[in-house]
Amino acid sequence: MELIDAHKAKIFALARRLAGNEQDAEDIVQESLLKAIDNIDTFRGEASFGTWLFSIALNESRGHLARQKRHGLRSIEEYLPSQDSSAVDSSASQRLLEWDDPHSKLETEELQRFIDQGLSDLPYIYREAFVLRYVEDLSVKEVAGMIGESEAATKSRILRARLALREYLARRFEVHHGR
Amino acid sequence: MADKCPDYAKELNDYLDGTFDPSLCHEIEAHVGHCQNCRIMIDTLRQTVKLCQEGKEVPLPPSLESKLNNLLQVRWEKKFGHQ
């Protein structure tokens, strides 16, 4: 019980990032921890207890969000830069110069809101890979194991998420600066 | 990246995360040294991750913590009995 207790906040933070809002995150963390108690006999210690709990929370997030049909409705292509690379580059060069120090131009709360919104706008499978890799700081191999994909497919998801988020933030910064 | 830029899109994450073949890193760096578009692309992709990592973690709301404590205790006792 102490072990589960010690991971409550961490699982909530993961669920919050994956769900994109607090209400869904509350449901996910509750279901995940109850499931962990129900299945604690199956924890064999091959992975750390935290990793085991993460896997349960990931499954719960997928199930929860699938039931709500909030993910997978749009293609990642909608979030990525256009394939007309020369057009992308000329506009990107201008607007992304603003990125040097976003903290100097945006309040921390506003910047946080942009990031939260950018993450929650990503199709779930990309958000999940990105959050596990860069927010939870897992290796590509660990992420691949958790999401049940090959390392190559995982890398591709992470990169696409990164490109899409970059594009999203660039657009938000552009709007913010009234361009 | 413009049409004339080398196509290293698939390797970008490995390059940015420092897990890329060093000889190819030199190739990218040589190009980026004189290509502003690629430099901005790489800088902003790096910045994207940095901003997400800096984001503050939302703390467990006290009301949820209290609710969870009760729920977990009840479930634990149901499974293992009073301890």
Image: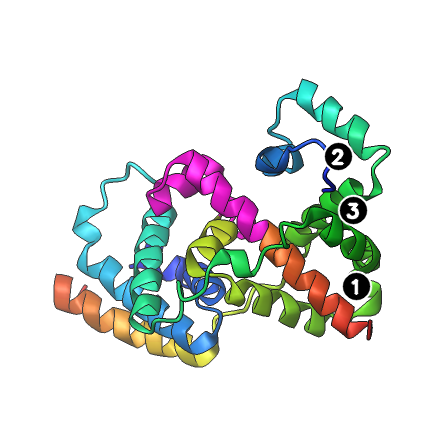
Q: Which disc number belongs to residue A29?
A: none
Please tell me whether residue B60 is drawn above or below residue A82 in the rendered image: below
Crowding at dot 2, Cα within 10 Å, few <14 / some 14-19 / many 20+, comes out as few
Q: Position of residue A77 (x, y in %)?
A: 52, 56
| Residue displayed at 27% across by 39% down | A45
Residue mark closest to the camera, 2 vs 3 = 2
Q: Position of residue A63 (x, y in %)?
A: 29, 64
Crowding at dot 3, Cα within 10 Å, few <14 / some 14-19 / many 20+, comes out as many
Instruction: Name the chain letter of the residue that bears numbered label 2.
Output: B
Quadrant of the rendered image containing residue A25:
bottom left
Q: Which disc number belongs to residue A103?
A: 1
Q: Which disc number belongs to residue B40?
A: 3
Q: Is residue A18 left or right of residue A66?
A: right
Quadrant of the rendered image containing residue A177:
bottom right
Instruction: Name the chain letter of the residue that bears numbered label 1.
Output: A
Frontmost residue, B32 versus A147 = B32
Q: Which disc number belongs to residue B4?
A: 2
- The Cα–Cα distance between marks 1 and 3, rounded to whole angstroms, is 18 Å
Tell me which segment is drawn in magenta.
A133-162
Q: Is residue A138 highlighted in magenta?
A: yes
- Secondary element type, mark 1: helix
| Residue displayed at 17% across by 50% down | A41
Q: What type is the residue that disc 1 sits on? A: His
Residue mark closest to the camera, 1 vs 3 = 3
